[in-house]
Image (tube, helix red, strand yellow):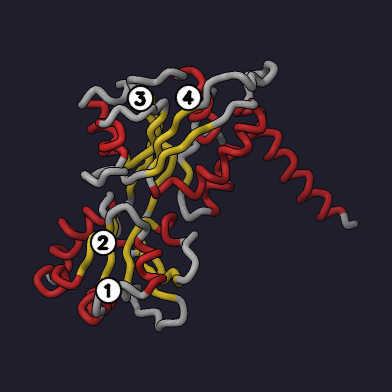
Amino acid sequence: MTFPTLTRRAALLLAALALAGCGSLGGKPDITAEPIHVMTSGGFTAAYNELTPGYEKANGRKVQTAYGASMGAASDSIPSRLARGEPADIVILARPALDALVAQGKVVSGSQVDLVRSSIGFAVRTGTPKPDISTVDALKRTLLAAPSIAYSASASGTYYETELLKKLGIEDQVKPKSQRILSERVGTVVARGDAALGLQQVSELLPIKGIDYIGPLPAEVQRVTVFSAGIATGAKQPEAARQLIRYINSPAAAPVIERTGLEAIVARGP
């Protein structure tokens, strides 16, 4: 066993211990405690699903999760779930949508914590040619040539249908062949062959099997979305919720977050 191997293993062990420290209150885990209820949108889901098992192990407290879009009227969107009175201690979604929930009295004012920056990208079905989207002109040609395009009903899709196509000057030609996807990942639709091209947050495309990620939107037309966490006004476990937010916002969580296609916004200070 070489010294570099020992060094890498030691680094991984230190990162795991650091995460455990961020998630633990220092006392004995309370296995009888009520679970923490979290609602999270797709942009942060891959990172969240990797991080929460470590929190549960360190604290002996379960986390129950509901998934949904940051915005929109779909029955499983986060605003719809909150409107029905579904239990929530934490909500994680696009910052503009989170601030809207604060204004509606659904999330505690001042509890918002920015977690990640997320970019938009494109994907095609595995085995099909990867079109060029490396420049604005190439993106326009690709969108005009695509027989069908799928986009999400959340933040990235809202940008696509209300701003991007107008910026590119191709709204009349492209919007009629574009399909807004409700309650399903865009990548899943593309993998089935129901759309030739799919647009969504990069972190939502990468985990989907059966598609090939092409790349991000060109910088000139990219829209970076900040995903943030907040404490629901109806939270029954507000202190535990804050603890979990600190855990997923810690420096030790950043490598997991970055691996899922996001840019971590790491908390500074205690």
Q: Are marks 3 and 4 in contact (CB under 8 Å)?
A: yes
State the residue position of label 3. Answer: 232
Q: Label 2, secondary structure: give it.
A: helix
Using the image, tell me which numbered label, if any, was put on residue 201: none
Specify few, some or many for label 2: CA neighbours under 10 Å numbering under 14, 14-19, or 20 or more.
some
Q: CA distance from mark 2 to mark 4?
A: 36 Å
- The one of 3 and 199 positioned closer to us in this rendering: 199
Q: Position of residue 129 (x, y in %)?
A: 40, 83
Please give the residue where the numbered disc 4 appears in the rendered image: 241
- Residue positioned 40% across, 49% down in the render: 43
Q: Nearer the viewer, mark 1 or mark 3?
A: 3
Is residue 21 shown left or right of residue 249?
right
User: Which labelled disc corresponds to residue 139?
Assistant: 1
**1 and 2 marks in contact (CB < 8 Å):** yes
In space, the residues marked 1 and 2 are separated at their CA atoms by: 10 Å
Give the vertical position of 241 relative to 194 (above or below).
Answer: above
Q: Quick one: label 4, few (<14), some, or many (20+) residues within 10 Å? A: many
